[in-house]
Amino acid sequence: MFEIASADFIAPDVKRFRIIAPAVAKKHQAGQFVILRVHDLGERIPITIAESDPDSGEITIIVQGIGRTTKDLNRKTSGDQIPDLVGPLGQPTHIENWGKAVIVSGGVGTAEALPIARAMKAAGNEVISIIGARTKSLVIAEELMKDLCDEVIVTTDDGSYGIKGLVIEPLRPMLESSSPPRLILAVGPLPMMKAVAELTRPYNIKTMVSLNTIMIDGTGMCGGCRATVDGKTVFVCVDGPEFDGHKVDFGELQQRIGQFKNQERQSLDQFLRSCRAEKSVEG
Amino acid sequence: MSTSATPSPDKQLTPKERMRIPRQKMPEQDPRQRTTNFNEVNLGLTEEMAIEEAQRCLQCAKPLCIDGCPVIIKIPEFIELIVQGDFIGAAAKIKEDSSLPAVCGRVCPQENQCEATCVVGNRFSPVAIGNLERFVADYEREHDMIQVPERAAVTGKKVAVIGSGPAGLACATDMAIYGHDVTIFEALHEYGGVLAYGIPEFRLPKKVLSVEIENLKKLGVKFVKNYLIGKTRTLDELLNEDGFEAAFIGTGAGLPWFLNLPGENLNGVYSANEFLTRVNLMKAYIFPEADTPVQIAKTAVVIGGGNTAMDSVRTAKRLGAKRAIIVYRRSEEEMPARIEEVHHAKEEGIEFQLLQAPIKYLDDGNGWLKGIECIKMELGEPDDSGRRRPVPIEGSEFFIEADFAVVAIGNGSNPLLARTTPGLDINKWGNIITASETGATSKPGVFAGGDIVSGGATVILAMGDGRKAAAAMDEYLKSKAKVASDE
């Protein structure tokens, strides 16, 4: 059992959990994730670690309530238990001094990119953060990024905050500039990462993307997370999660991620019905 | 002591009379019924049947059956106790050499081991040793009379067992009996390794496994789950910082192999590990009550001819596939699956397409599998494994319509532990190199066994490795203590 030390909503449907997991906190490096389950018949889902504190033994994860498990998780509060959690899994982000690095993040990916920004900065990089969100209320971790990075740029789809448009808008002029970044790292929804990789491809600037696939065990045993990179099959859980965005087959990945969408819908609907039933009993 | 039905009048049967008794047929769930549920296929012998079957044993002076057993169970002795009606005594006799009889009685390939060398089998059907083993283990459990083995005096020495599959469980049992302080580390959220995620409920009910795990806990073995050695903690940290004086690695089969054919990452194509893990460990067969989904196939094709392939194809059928097909590149004779599993599969309406191999998975245009292009094979000269090598017949390509495929062709090794353990030697396939007699690795105090060493074998061979390593680990700890006291 893993106790939740604190749980706070930081945006609509987006909750930050601090979980007591000392062994994981001690070993965590930027880019790694955990796999957890919320109940005895629960599914195993991967979630990137947003922060870890080896001294307090806590890890932080940011959860956006989208499917059955994340919505269930977001009902939990401090003092509640998470029955199963294992990690840190995956290869850590490759950190080196590139000179100038841009971290592009979208949605909860911004929180997940925090440890990467911190490690890149510590390695001596000039780090620029581009944060993308649908709308102002969904911009998370901006202040934290400001503490870590040399520059933070926010874009929103609806223009309610920062630059109106997608993350690639402010990125484009950087690629054209006289001192372009030597590394781009994208963390967030698949279409965003794909757009970033496509934008940087002609400039031949190294672009890493952090893939979030369906996983079960997370230790290489099942192969459910497989993706095609550079024409070869990789297991995202043990070979990744970060790969060269110019070599990832995004089309295949998009299809694989949607493999169970009908069942996921069914599972979520059933869960929401049971929540409503619970509420009406309580009411 | 008699614990049950008194056996038939106490008379000595002649060998001839014994051999004349027909082998007792294992009662089974009806094939038509069982393809609609996940309940166990084999129902178990009755007490009367078990005694009758036990009387078939000739009690050979030099029992060859024992030579066929990887853990050297005293087979004639436990069978004689069954004849006497002492089922609990028989179970205790088996447990002197094997820690998981209820499991092995179900999943061991007895036909290639103890029963293959049974003398009765020379002229008639061999004594049903496996069914008898299962009977006494079930009897003991169902009557709530499982005895926890006695432990030697506590040594206070901490031993780590990495992986809770058959090799780890066997090693942990013996190390606990030797008096050591044993902790098993498991990466998943349930214990049992392949017994939990791989072997289906209809062949090994999970309650059988959970009782075995409970017994190990009673024996004093500590269990830690959600703990991945190599990530959560390294092996060196266990040995150098956490006070463990020796470790056994039984991490099992690793990454599933694919054939690297075009279209292998289409939706609807799974590794056997993924498919079976979804259904067994994650209980997708009761989705949406359990959260993890699984695809229900119209036509399921399983590539491979081993037990895992049989488990996969029979699972697909139970989930509702209209057609469930085995595609195997050699002939039935070369199939590594147990005869019983092939037989059960055929009874359940599984189709066998032999001497065929897939060459390409075809896309329906939306990223989903619509069928498999295959090619016919013929058998050529024997290869390294001694089996005749399958050779494609040119121009014999054909198409199987299928919306679901499972690749069940084996596993490579998982590099996770070796990568994070300097000084642990592995071979070119990534399997840990050990001394065959002891399971000792290149790293002092570290032993290994099961599939991570062999590359892929059976539950009982893994258990044999675990026991062998336990004996060597015990010696290692004793000699280490002696050196320390001499100094």
Image: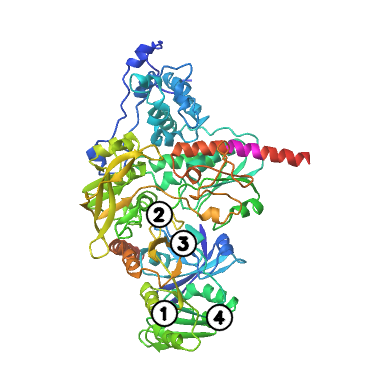
Give the chain letter at badge 1: A
- The residue beneath circle 3 is A239
Q: Give amino acid for label 3.
A: Asp
Q: Give amino acid for label 4.
A: Gly
- Asked if badges 2 and 4 are on one and the same chain, I answer yes
Contact (CB < 8 A) between labels 3 and 4? no
Q: Main secondary structure of the magenta part?
A: helix
* Circle nearer the viewer, 1 or 3: 1
First-in-chain label (1 vs 2): 1
Residue range (magenta):
B470-476
Reply above or below: B73 against A219.
Answer: above
- The residue beneath circle 2 is A222
Whole-angstrom CA distance, mark 1 to mark 2, is 33 Å
Residue B475 on the magenta segment:
yes
Q: Circle 4 — which element?
A: loop
Q: Give amino acid for label 2.
A: Cys
Its colouring scheme is: rainbow
* Mark count: 4
Q: Position of residue B49 (x, y in %)?
A: 34, 23
First-in-chain label (2 vs 4): 4
Residue extending farthest right: B487
- Give the quadrant of the C terminus of chain B: top right
* Circle nearer the viewer, 3 or 2: 3
B454 relative position to B420: left or right: left
Reply above or below: B172 against A135.
Answer: above
Q: Which mark is residue A99?
A: 4
Q: Residues within 10 Å of mark 3 (few under 14, many from 20)?
A: some
Q: Position of residue B85 (x, y in %)?
A: 42, 21
